[in-house]
Each structure stands twice: as structure tokens, then as C-alpha cells.
Amino acid sequence: MYGVPAPYQNLDPLDELIATILSQSTTNVNSQRAFESLKKRFPAWEQVRRARPATIAEAIKSGGLANVKSVVIKNILQEIKARCGTLDLSFLRSLGAAEALKFLTSLKGVGPKTARCVLLFACDLPVFPMDTHIFRIARRLEIIPQKCSDEQAHQLLAPLIPPHKHLSLHINLIHHGRRICHPRNPQCNRCCLLDYCPVGQQQEM
């Protein structure tokens, strides 16, 4: 229904990590604006690491929750520098998915979704980030329980993803959630998954 999305190329893992943190609890437009403002104010991540949280917050204020996110970003950069000696996460590409995921989620403020977004989009590793739209669709299809944690949902869904389909399925399920499978008043009569969806079939009765 949505085609095969173009592959992402040449994304820097640290850029993707910070951009994903900025995307939390805001729109794509606002988070992109905040990321661009941050990069303009601080061309190098080392400059961000050395900056005061208030200065970082001023640069990312368009993304919302600036005071909280500025502290998270600074602390993550401090921790990466302390553990790796450099602000470079390109080594994640050479790790297995499980080991790379373990490293990222060990950073305070990096949850399972954020870590998997970095590994999927910037490292081309076979991981599947859960998004609010994907949660909703998976619950309606009864692939995951109505109540389960983020990490439980990731663990349940991961074995079901066919090889080399992690990126396309992630992007297309988000498209589907935005266009058809809305939180309220889903357009079940237009849904390509209706034959597999108990909730949709109930709606159509």
C-alpha cells in the first residue's frame, strides 16, 4: 500500500541519537528546527558537551522541554566521552545488534525506542523501534497484549520481523497509523489489514 521507503544513508549515529532525543514529546517540524538550531549554535558536539545546560536549552527551545532535554543531552555526551574517549559512535556499526543496544540503553536517558532508532537509521542494524502508532496497530491486531511495557513489546515483536524488513515495516506502519489506523475513528473500511484485525472487523459489523 505504501511502497518500499528509500534507505537512509550516511547518518551519523551521534547526530541521530541527539535528534531522536529532541524528537520526544514534540512534532517532527519542531524537533528538526531544534536540531538545526543546536548544530548552528554548536558546530561540534564537543562544544555542546562543554556548554552550560542553560545555553543548550536556549538553542533547542523550539523543540519543547528544553530545560529537561538540555541536561539529558549534556549528560549523555559527558558519559560517552568518559567511556569512549571521544564523541564518536560509529563503532556501533561493527557491533552486533544486541551488544550495540546494550551500550546505548546503558546511557542514562536513552530508552529502548531511542536506542533502536539510532541503530536502525544510522547503523543499519536489524532492530525494530516501537512507535506510538505501531503500538496501537499491534494491539489492534492482537500481536501484543493491551497492557505491556515498551521493552516487552519490543521483545514480542522483534522475532516476527522478516529479514531486511525492519526499516520498511517501521516506516510504513507509522504511515498507516497516521493515515488510516487513527487513535479515534479509524478508517477501517480503507484498511489493508482489515482481514487480520479483530478490532477492525468488529468496527465494520
Image: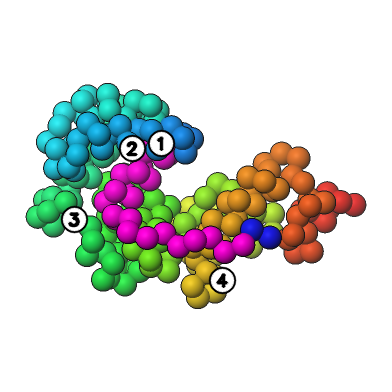
- Which marked residue is nearer to the observer: mark 4 or mark 2? 2
Residue topped by disc 1: 31
Q: Which is more N-terminal, label 3 or label 4?
A: 3
- Circle 4/circle 2 CB separation < 8 Å: no
Q: Secondary structure at mark 1?
A: helix
Q: Which residues are magenta?
A: 3-25
The answer to whether marks 2 and 1 mark residues whose Cβ atoms lie closer than 8 Å is: yes
* Three-letter amino acid code at the position of disc 2: Phe
Q: Nearer the viewer, residue 171 or 182?
A: 171
Identify the residue position indicated by label 4 in the image.
160
Residue 146 visible, this orientation: no
Residue beneath label 3, please?
88
Q: Which label sits on residue 163?
A: none
Residue 149 on image: x %, y %: 50, 52
Q: Earlier in the sequence, mark 4 or mark 2?
A: 2
Q: Few, some or many C-alpha atoms within 10 Å of disc 3 (few <14, some 14-19, many ≥20)? A: some
Q: Is residue 147 left or right of residue 34?
A: right
Q: Which residue is mark 2?
A: 35
Between discs 2 and 3, the one toward the N terminus? 2
**Residue 40 lies in quadrant:** top left
* Image position, residue 145 (x, y; %): 62, 57
**Mark positioned earlier in the residue sequence (4 or 1):** 1
